[in-house]
Amino acid sequence: MSGVDIEANASSSDVIREGDTVVCYTSDDRVFFQEILPRMTIRIGKVQIPVKCVVGFPFGSIFEEKEKTLVPVEGGLFPDPVAPEVGEFEVPTNDNRSYTDTNDSQKLSNVEIAELRAQGVNGSALIAKLVENSDTWDTKTDFSKQKYLKKKQQKYMPRIQMVRCTAMALCDVYHVRQPSKILNLRFDIIGQILSYGNIYAGAQVMVVETCMGLITGAIAERMLGHGTLLAGYEGQQPSVDTIRRFNFDQAVNDSIVYFPFHYIGQLDNDEAALVAKEAALNEEEQPSEDVLEARKAEVAARIAMYTEAEQKKYLAKKEQRKLKQRQAKPKKTPSDIRALLRAPSDSLVIVTHYDPLVVLLQLLPRLGLSRPFVVYCEYLEPLATAFDALQRMESIINLQLNDTWTREYQILPGRTHPEMTMSAGSGYLLSGIKVEATPPPPHLADLKVLPRRTNGPKKPRTRD
């Protein structure tokens, strides 16, 4: 790909751009995040390579190290499999019963292999020489050959695939590396949450989560800036470190409105009194002119100690911050946020380690009629308590408490079977729909319990 083509494609969202974050899958079974910045490097095998060379290539591209740079290659992370991946399956006639691994079947020594690598022999040619000099290659089954090639490719042909940061990819990384950070969520659970919550573009969704912004990002990814996403948080600021990894554009980021939990308790108060109180507090918190002058003098003294190059760098960053501030939309005021909270929301999503019943009862009045809610929790007991309480409410219908479970399968000719290791349980989901509570009919108003069908013995039928 030429430099002109890379610049032409850089504006597309389907290619890797400078400043993006990607999910990297390596041939040695590593998975991690990587920021695409000029100063960043990545380890491929035993070599540190700058990542700026991948800018302009499509997401999902597979790269291989060549002369301390990354070049795109065809095929997967493990190219040219020996055993069939598709098509008809033939049962092999040979087996490994007479094979003994004595580690002396390879004619090439370690010194000779090191010399070949020093001469610049690429990975595929080196693996071909290893196969050529193996005494037991012809006696191996196709599956043993593929296992042998995969092991050698991991060592001599390390590859890396860079994929887009989606909710599924991010959840996959966190579930492997730090599952407790996301409350042991799996990607299939996120799909169920979006489905039960009826998330769609143009909706107003209220979400409370403590998964570093993973659920907020998954909802914003589906809405793509169309609608409003109200994200509640506890503390001084929201903990949404994962949001920046989604590489959202400004329109999607502007559609996410963060609000502190104490705003919920203020919605029934007089708005004019709240605005006046907040204005008075802001005036008290404003520093005096003497403090501002002291700060400016301190900054000027620090800049004077910089070199000329450092001063230019500082001024460039300052201008860049001012430009971003001019381009960004003005932030919503607390009054604007409370106005959004007073409007009935179309969906309510709760994924948090807080008590789900307490949070749900506080937010249910802000959910519109005939609108769904979904609550996720790692443990069954808090949701069982919430289920029992909601069952007694006439305004909740279609109440469900579900266990989540999944199993991955390997799909290959003649070798289709469940994976040897799997993630069984991954939390529980409570879902339902809020409706208007209507009084019972007059002839049933005095009944404490509605009559229901029983499974008692039936009366014998007699013929007339």
Image (cartoon, rainbow, N blue to C red):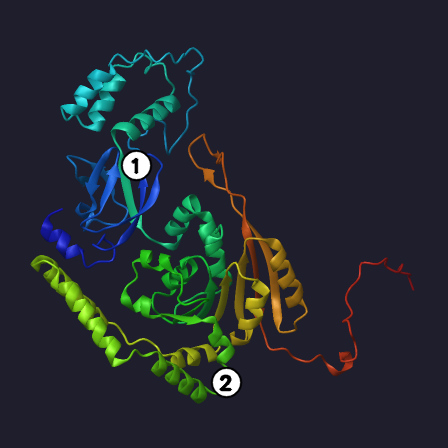
Q: Which mark is residue 269?
A: 2
Earlier-in-chain disc, 2 versus 1: 1
Secondary element under disc 2, as helix, strand or loop, is loop
Q: How many marks?
A: 2
Q: Nearer the viewer, mark 2 or mark 1?
A: 2
Residue 327 shows in the view: no
Determine crowd level at label 1: few under 14, some 14-19, many 20+ residues with C-alpha closer than 10 A.
many
The amino acid type found where label 1 is placed reads Leu
Residue 8 location (% of width, % of height): 14, 56
Q: Is residue 132 above or below residue 159?
A: above
Q: Residue at x 29, y 37 (%)?
A: 76
Q: Nearer the viewer, residue 357 or 375?
A: 357
Secondary element under disc 1, as helix, strand or loop, is loop
Determine crowd level at label 2: few under 14, some 14-19, many 20+ residues with C-alpha closer than 10 A.
few
Residue 47 location (% of width, % of height): 22, 35
Residue 145 shows in the view: yes
Residue beneath disc 1: 77
Q: Is residue 186 above or below residue 219?
A: above
Q: Residue at x 61, y 70 (%)?
A: 396
Q: Residue at x 62, y 63 (%)?
A: 386
Residue 370 location (% of width, % of height): 54, 73
